[in-house]
Amino acid sequence: MNIVKQAITGSEENENQKMPYDALVSFYRAFNNKDFALMQANWLQTEEASMSNPLGGIKRGWEEIKMVYQKIFSGEVRVYVEFYDYSIDETENMFIAAGRERGRLETENETIDLNIRTSRVYRRQDNVWKQLHHHGSMDDPKLLAVYQNLIFDKGDVSYDTIK
């Protein structure tokens, strides 16, 4: 198994989503730039798509998944993540990327470091990789609570107040 330490930030050169690496670069470019059209292009547009992440619980189908990204992209909170310490296992029509995300959540008053365990599953559709499933989880329940409260604008919660 090849573990890649070099982070994917979304700022890398990529030509299309024909290679697994390109599909991942496109995802992080969409996420870090709040580019909803690019995010939508990255995902499979069917009911088969699913996501289980710290913000949305389990979402099934693009119609549910897109609401999570719309909330993140439209909010005042800025979230940046990069994918590192990952491996890619590929078959002819699917690949799984499993690794870690690091980044930060920024509000007007504070910056919080994020550490997330992440896996993404892509399926080849019309010779282009489309995301079928994402799973992300945080080890620190206090950090998770702050992250959820800030994204969903549930009041002024800081990491220091719940340590």
Image (tube, rainbow, N blue to C red):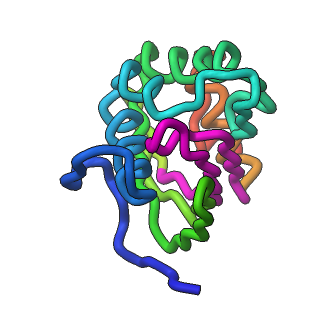
Observer-nearest residue: 22 or 67? 22
Q: Is residue 122 or residue 108 the one in the foreground? A: 122
Q: Residue at x 61, y 15 (%)?
A: 67
Seen at 45% across and 16% down, the residue is: 75
Q: Is residue 101 left or right of residue 23?
A: right
Q: Is residue 140 left or right of residue 21?
A: right
Note whether 61 is above or below 14 in the view shown.
above
Q: Position of residue 94 (x, y in %)?
A: 62, 55
Q: Residue at x 61, y 51 (%)?
A: 120
Task: Tell me, yes or no, whether the highlighted magenta stretch contains residue 38.
Answer: no
Find residue 52 and report its horizontal and vertical position in percent: 75, 39
The magenta-colored residue range is 113-139
Q: Is residue 111 visible?
A: no
Name, please, the residue furthest toward the left: 13
How many tags in the picture? 0
Image quarter for residue 34?
A: top left
Q: Main secondary structure of the magenta part?
A: strand
Determine if residue 161 is in view. yes
